[in-house]
Image: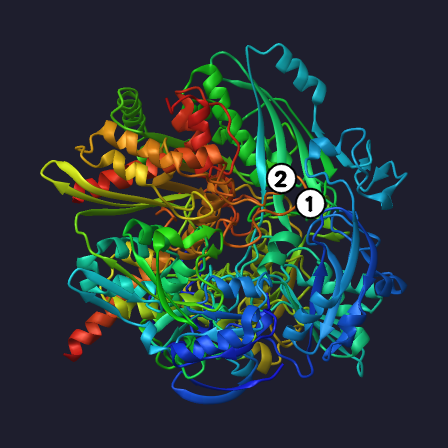
Amino acid sequence: MIPAAFEYHRPSDIASALATLREFGDEARVVAGGHSLIPMMKLRMASIGHLIDLQDIADLKGIRIDGNTVRIGAMVTQQELIDDAALTRAAPLLRETALQIADPQVRAVGTIGGNVANGDPGNDMPAVMQCLDATFTLTGPSGTRDVKARDFYEAAYVTARADEEILTAVSFTVSGGGHAYEKQKRKIGDYATAAAAVMLQKDGTACSAASIAMTNLSDVPVWSKAAADALVGTACNPADIGSAVAAALADISPTADNRGPVEFKRHVAGVIIRRAIERAWSRA
Amino acid sequence: MKKMQLTLTVNGEAHELLAEPRELLIHVLREKLNLTGPHIGCETSHCGACTVDMNGRSVKSCTVFAAQANGAAITTIEGLGSPGALHPLQEAFREHHGLQCGFCTPGMITRAHRLLQENPNPSEEDIRFGMAGNLCRCTGYQNIVKAILAAAAEMNAVKEAAE
Amino acid sequence: MNELAPISREDRVEKLKGLGHSRKRVEDVRFTQGKGNYVDDLKLPSMLYGDFVRSPYAHARVTSIDKSAALALPGVVAVLTAEDLAPLNLHWMPTLAGDKQMVLADGKVLFQGQEVAFVVANDRYVAADAVDLVVVEYEELPVVTDPFKALEPDAPVLREDLAGQTSGAHGERRHHNHIFLWEVGDKQATEEVIASAEVVAEEMVYYHRTHPCPLETCGCVASMDAVNGKLTIHGTFQAPHVVRTVASLLSGIEEHKIRVISPDIGGGFGNKVGVYPGYVCAIVASIVTGKPVKWIEDRMENLTATAFARDYWMKGRIAATKDGRITALSCHVTADHGAFDACADPTKFPAGFFSIVTGSYDIPVAYVGVDGVYTNKAPGGVAYRCSFRVTEAAYLIERMIEVLAIELGMDAAEVRAKNFIRKDQFPYQSALGWEYDSGDYHTAWNKALKAVGYEDLRREQAERVEAFKRGETRKLIGIGLTHFTEIVGAGPVKNCDILGMGMFDSCEIRIHPTGSAIARLGTISQGQGHATTFAQILASEIGLPADSITIEEGDTDTAPYGLGTYGSRSTPVAGAATAMAGRKIRAKAQMIAAYLLEVHDGDLEWDVDRFVVKGAPERFKTMAEIAYASYNQAIPGLEPGLEAVSYYDPPNMTYPFGAYVCVMEIDVDTGVADIRQFYALDDCGTRINPMIIEGQVHGGLTEAFAIAMGQEIAYDEIGNVKNATLMDFFLPTAWETPHYVTDFTETPSPHHPIGAKGVGESPNVGGVPAFSNAVHDAFRVFGLKQAHMPHDHWRIWKIAHDLGLHG
């Protein structure tokens, strides 16, 4: 498996990265950790004339926690997410998720920006970002704009990011409460058969706020408002959870693959969502 | 295709070399620097046979372009221990029969080396999770886990004795 | 000179590190330092690289190949197609199974990934670029990936080259996609017993298509020395001598002008037995260019084109009395061999030793029929960590026992115990013609059941079912039992050969004057630790420390001819040759010692590492002293030196056996299965190195776990391979792999010089039914009889779903 030739660029700031991106248009792609892109290039399923490596851009690094606001640079690796104690205190959902992504070596180089930006429905962080109602910061030739994670994904590998833009950061507001990322996979390194991210807040005995999103159960990550609505105001009893699961299942459309047919995936999705809700509720 | 000038520090030694940007780090190490310890197993970043240490992290060198590694400090199996003074992991893998065909072993030991720096006192479960990026087709892992536990104990004992 | 201070006998034995010693492996010193020497590590001056253009289609006519753009790429040296190979008559090659196979597509392609053109360039990157530039036009043809459909009257004709041939290497062909029907046993008698039996169980059992997938793929470096006319081939060969002979027959180069070297091999598991188009093309390219040519397949090529395993549809019928005595077994197999019959089996056994299918049981009458069928899938059919088709046989009988137990309403452990061949029946003649050498199944079985607390497990399982029915849990417990009998160590030359070469093996020993030695064998280790264990056999035979004995394999210029390493044959055959050659050394040493001690040969006895004068223990000569004398002292009537060679033709196969128990927790809702406990008792006869045996068992069980629980090569209806990378082809990590408990009994083989039987493949043979039976067992109480492997999450979920367990 040998990739086709390309020109390599390693800009040291966002402006030069954007300039190169603009100069070569369709032929250029940015690379972060590269663990989605490079295998595609080696299989010659992605043809890239100009590869723009973002590793030297200091502005894309770092995790900043400012009160209730968390901002994570696009080039922060999964391992850095796992190791950041302050982040784990603020948003433990990220560590729980990152630990379920790929394997140690891949987590060492795989980044949050790459994971959310490339639009692969198998990636785990997009659903987590939707669950957290995160915002993606996109920087392009005409400046910077923010897009909600919940509005970002259009189809498999098709996102709201324009070709000449770079996703530079993700940010979200910490809400507290209980969290869970529940994922069924065939083995370490596999994408999800079904996975669900859940955040729940509790007021007394009732659920006061809920957010539920799912991975690899449609061609895009799915945030289910209906599922969340089904829980808010309830005590998350089995029947309430059942309603939420039913609502979530109404929002997905999984496809058959080597992990199994649609009927199986829908069933497992139901189980996984239920377990995620139960675990999040137990922590709320 | 145009070649670029690369600087790599490998096992403590600085190298200047020419390579196409698309050349994979594993090929540069194996073919340009003759470090044939790390191997190519799956080519899609699943098996870990090509694992090396890059800037203090375990990486799969089949999924890193040489250009991305430009300027990096890299440690391969050849940089751990020497014939007269094997690394405790190398000793432990032999002592506990943690290898058979030997093909995964360099990547396995190189990864274990980093794991023990990340976590000097791993449990069996920590090791199984921390080594899950490296496939072995021969051993069933049980003796690999045993070897890493033994090496950790040995390294900790040496460290304690020194302190 | 005798030692100054006498060493105790125990110390002398210990010093040898001979049989039974958990000697640390000598190989590991280099492997742990990254100093192994695998084929892709080899770099020769001016070496070129070969790469294949492969077919994206499973069945198509090749209408044109335009290589001009590829040839125009700087660095490209040649692009070979069938047209280029035809004048050399190398566009097709013979297979090990008596068929022939295209080296490069000759007019059509028959499976996805088939080799179409071979690009040779001065760099592997350029070669890969050139592959993209070869323009091949195809005209798609109807695809058949189902062996049953392939045998329908109007099925597409796959092998047009065989048009009009109504018989093949193994007899009559009754259809254009039929290869052979191989039959063993008494069909009529079996049918009669089944027809009148009190109880009959019948099931179709599928052992799916999978792949050995060693971590190192296949590859070679062919190097033609034009000056001396000598061809050297380094490669991933489990049978280097066979490769040399085949290369000679194909190329016309005399065999002494060909040197085949198997360097360190990164796992084989059967994948590296066959001869692949890549080897042939690299050889041709080297001859044509006069330069060394390296070919290393990538992982996708490995999984899609070289050497699949299994793909057996087995229809079993087993008859018994009401109280559980088995009275007959019948099995018909529809064997999917892919596009070419390239199975690696001894020539006279087109279905390998599948007729071991009566397993560990005393079955009075049996019949087996195997239909080989062509489909649009990759050729292969190798023995993936098993003796030839033995895993298939073990799986079938161990499933049929379970199905019979259901039919009888009996416990499956009891059905087994009731039907085991008894210890006093060995040597045992099976209904399908084998003579089992030795065994003590009841002892092994009882030990296994006791070790796992079988009765308690069954009680816990029953309680769990009750809790499940009450809605208190969604997890069931499965208890998977297996008692397997293998047949390994092919094999007696009278009926075992590969391409005419008898399946003996060999060892040549040279003792050096100062008491160390080198031994060379016809086998080749791929991780089994031959350099360690063969030295141990020899240490015990000749009394020199194993640490003073170098074992060398894999170089046909230096090693004696042998048939190689696969089918657990190294210990049974080459291990025996080693012992026999050692005994020849000892016989000569005895004569030398007699001369030195001035006694008659018969007055000496062997004692660990020396010959001692009977009744005078202070008078002795150690083997080291004898070795020195053999080179330095004129001994009347004896040639100088101390060397021996043995070519060992085994009188029989060996029959290792074992008892395995797997306990599994199954989540009915997700199909996720957790292995809670795995106990493996192996009896491989005399145990040479317990540490290595345990390692072999761990590894084989892990392969069995993978195969049973998820590993497969699946095709879609148009012949696309669905699992061509390690994302989808299941190789478990340390995280998924269960913990194993190993145990043993020791029943030596009566015909093997040291009583050893071989162990490398037992855990795969026995492991697969143990895992699979555990899945089935969990659902037995709900009415499950048979569900096909691999038992991945969705298939387990489907079992539960079909049984109505999802409400």
* Residue type, label 1: Lys
Numbered label attached to residue C377: 1
Helix, strand or loop at label 1? It is: loop
Q: Chain of mark 2?
A: C
The colour scheme is: rainbow
Nearer to me, A209 or A6: A209
Q: Does the residue at mark 2 contact the one at mark 1 (Cβ under 8 Å)?
A: yes
Residue displayed at 82% across by 69% down: C254
Residue C165 falls in which quadrant of the image?
top right
Q: What quarter of the picture does the C terminus of chain C occupy?
A: top left
Residue A181 position in % (x across, y down): 29, 48
Residue C703 in the image: above or below residue C122: above
Q: What quarter of the picture does the N terminus of chain C occupy?
A: bottom left
Q: Is residue C445 in view?
A: no
Q: Which residue is mark 2?
A: C311
Residue displayed at 49% across by 51% down: A156
Q: Chain of mark 1?
A: C
Residue displayed at 29% across by 30% down: A243
Residue C68 position in % (x across, y down): 81, 71
